[in-house]
Image (cartoon, rainbow, N blue to C red):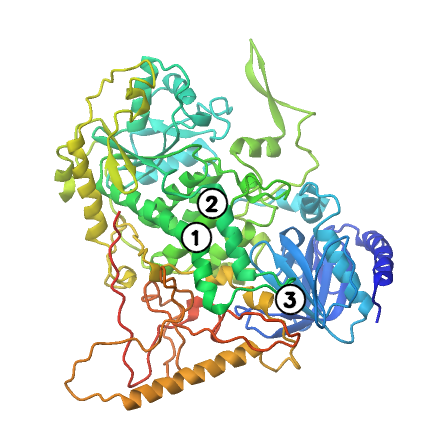
Amino acid sequence: MLTGSRTTFKVRQMLPDVKERMLSQSGNSARSRDVFGLRCLPGECVLQRTAMVRKKLTAREGRGWLSGTLFCTHFRVAFVPQDGPKADDNADPILLGDHDIALASIEKVVAVGPNRTKLVTPNSSLKFTPEELVLYCRDMRVMCFLFDRLTPDAQVIEITFTIAKTYQPLRPGSVLSFQNAALGSVEMKQFLSNRRRDSHMNWFESAADWEQELERCGATSWRVSSVNDRFEMSNSLSKYIVVPHKVLDTELKKSFAHFNEGRIPRWCWRHPRGSDLLRMSSFQYNIYHEKDDLRNLELVLFGCQSSLCVVVELGEELPSPADIQLAHSRLRALCLGDISTSVSVPDDKWLSTLESTRWLDYIRSCLRKASEVSCLLRSGHLTVALQEVEDRDMGCVVSSLVQVMCDPHYRTQHGFQGLMQKEWVMAGHRFYSRINYHRDSDKEESPVFLLFLDCVWHLWFQFPSRFQLTDDFLLALHDSVHLPLFSTFLSNCQRERCKRSQNVSQSYTPVNGWRDMLSPHSSSDPLDPPLPPVWDWALQYSQERRDRFSQSVVAAPPLQALLNGNLNTNLDAHLLADTIPGSVFLLSRGTFTCPPNLPPWRSGSSGVYKKSHRRALSSEIVPGLERLLKAWSLADVPQNPAAVSGPKGALDPCEPLLPLLMGPCMSLWRECYLRGALHAQAFSHPVSSHRRHPVDRLAEEVQQLKDQLAQLSSSKRPDPLGSTQEPRRTDGNLNQSTNNSTFLYSALRPKTTPPPTSTRQHSSRGHSSLSAALPSRPPNRDGNKHSFLFGHSAGADARSEPRYHPPPGTTKLPKSNGQPLTS
């Protein structure tokens, strides 16, 4: 066995020779090459390989171990199964296979020895030969590879240091080297340039795309303006914005300076019952306000409505980007732990620690705010404007959630992708800064988009039959965020994307005006590879995986949209009868207020325009609006979310999906956050590939004990005929937090459970009592204490879990008394 620093020195001397030898053998070809059994991309070279390696499979993959060969290229860590299907030579290249990991998504490499663990860095040295190699990924995955005893120690150490040196260079630089490794070859550039975009989704990149959206929503009194086509008015907004017909571009140009970063009130979506949803940033107080400019601001703010406008302030109730970053970091540390120091959270404190991360609290606050806005828009004939300081973070979250709740079109795969283009990509969300691909600055890093995906998952979790997209699609989108290869996430606004793709600049002359011209000194390198959009799923996943992105749903009859100017025939319109036309209200913390400085230019201290052409506000109008919001909140919030998704539920597409937000209804996205928990916290060498994992055997013993207790309790409890007993729980709710009752795991299925009739039955998932007992810690081979988070050996795919059926003779679990959503 080769140990000590001498082995490390020899391995480092060998790595440059191996790289040069592989580069000389790589070459370029018109199609993917087969190198040592690995299907390589054009221009991809193999740096190191090791045979006789076993990979630990996740619950989705069936668990157990898979034998094969481990490769390390300058782009990915690939694992080729020994008995895997042969790849088609004529098939289009796929960036990552089912068992591959992109080097850019790896966060740390840990080597596991007989009785120790070591965090491997490019400058570290190993004094033992690793038996297991654990790769922590930024997307919450953990890959575990077990080396065979017959594998030479030199190969084990070589591939360990090759991965450590390749994924994290000695000098941290740009992600351009990673992009060139995957997409930089001539063949790959030509292949990407010939790719066609999906014509079934709306990209919102042209005026015609926005016109199509206006026609779909029935917003006939709105128009598409190209006033920001050269990004002169606002650097962060898109080229095209939607404004009222009665506001001219010459008048509109004077309004940009009054808002932060020039993000004026602009149209996002129109409810079929006549309400409009707008977004805007905070108002600027430190500039001079002309009287005519301020009147134009009110025309833009009210849009095409004449009754009232409700400004929803998002900064007071929703978390800041720094809060989201801190909560996600705590959640990651809780779910994955740190195996290099053998630190883990005890099982009896796991749920309380989860609550202290505040991740679920932030999801609850976002869903609650989106539910309030959805109830307002449902009333009809008013304008709801979402206001944020910069309108680039939580405005994207709330506006997208509102449209997912209210519009069935955005619950389809192509509709959801178009929604991301409209409310995130074109609206100027700072993807590049928030994701922090360079890993050089943590000041602006914040997973705001991942928080939104978790909110959508909660909606899907409670209303699965109302969504055409599936949790597999949301999980694939979550993982793609951590792969810096897509133009969707590699810019902060459309202006930056245009600079990179077109490599142009602007010049001005008195005769010709503004003209685009090629700039040889542009920061964008013309030799950079073309970056595809993330919606080109064929580059990442096989056809079998893409087929699981959507499911068939019952088509609801579309409701005819109310055109602008039509009278609202809503039964609750009398609540707005006492509303003064032109009134502006502020919705904050669930209550309505009418401060005198809302809009800000109506205040005497905020500008020179002291008198408004609209009448003053009255506090007597506020209770009517509060009754309106509470009426919608209490009217149709189902006691059981399955009632809406079931066959007898309401099929009105205007009815928003109002989720249940009590503690028992807020769940952890187990398929995302806990898929690597077992790999990170348990290192058990199987004696043979047919032997079950110790955690599986322990879960089976726990299930047997639960069955015996159920049989004993049913045999001892008398059940006379005609007796009426109050139903009681058969389990002790061991997965329930004393603070907020947050459930993570579905109930264990007894052996007498009949087979499920469908894999898409989710009628009782949103509020059912989940009570899987957590087992105690089994002894490890190395003496370390690791906590196991799963209490049963069933597959982790929650989609295929049937509803809980108690064995004969036992009482059923009582239904949760779901309380309505209140503001």
Which amino acid is tagged 3?
Answer: Cys
Would you name the residue on which mark 3 appears? 144
Q: Secondary structure at mark 1?
A: loop
Mark 1 or mark 2, earlier in chain: 2
Which of the two residues, 522 or 172, is positioned nearer the viewer here?
172
Would you name the residue on which mark 2 appears? 323
Q: Which mark is residue 358?
A: 1
Position of 577 with respect to 260 (left or right) is: left
The residue drawn where x is 37% and y is 17% is: 251
- Label 1 vs label 2: CA separation? 9 Å
The residue drawn where x is 19% and y is 34% is: 566
- Label 1 vs label 3: CA separation? 29 Å
In the rendering, at what x and y percent does residue 184 appear? 70, 44
Q: Secondary structure at mark 2?
A: helix
Which of the two residues, 517 or 809, is positioned nearer the viewer here?
809
In the rendering, at what x and y percent does residue 764 appear? 32, 67
Q: Quadrant of the N terminus?
A: bottom right
* Viewer-side label of 2, 3: 2
Asked if disc 1 and disc 2 are in contact, CB closer than 8 Å, the reply is yes
Position of 279 with respect to 14 (left or right) is: left
Which amino acid is tagged 2?
Answer: Asp
Other residues around mark 1 within 10 Å, as few (<14) / some (14–19) / many (≥20) = some
- Label 2 vs label 3: CA separation? 31 Å
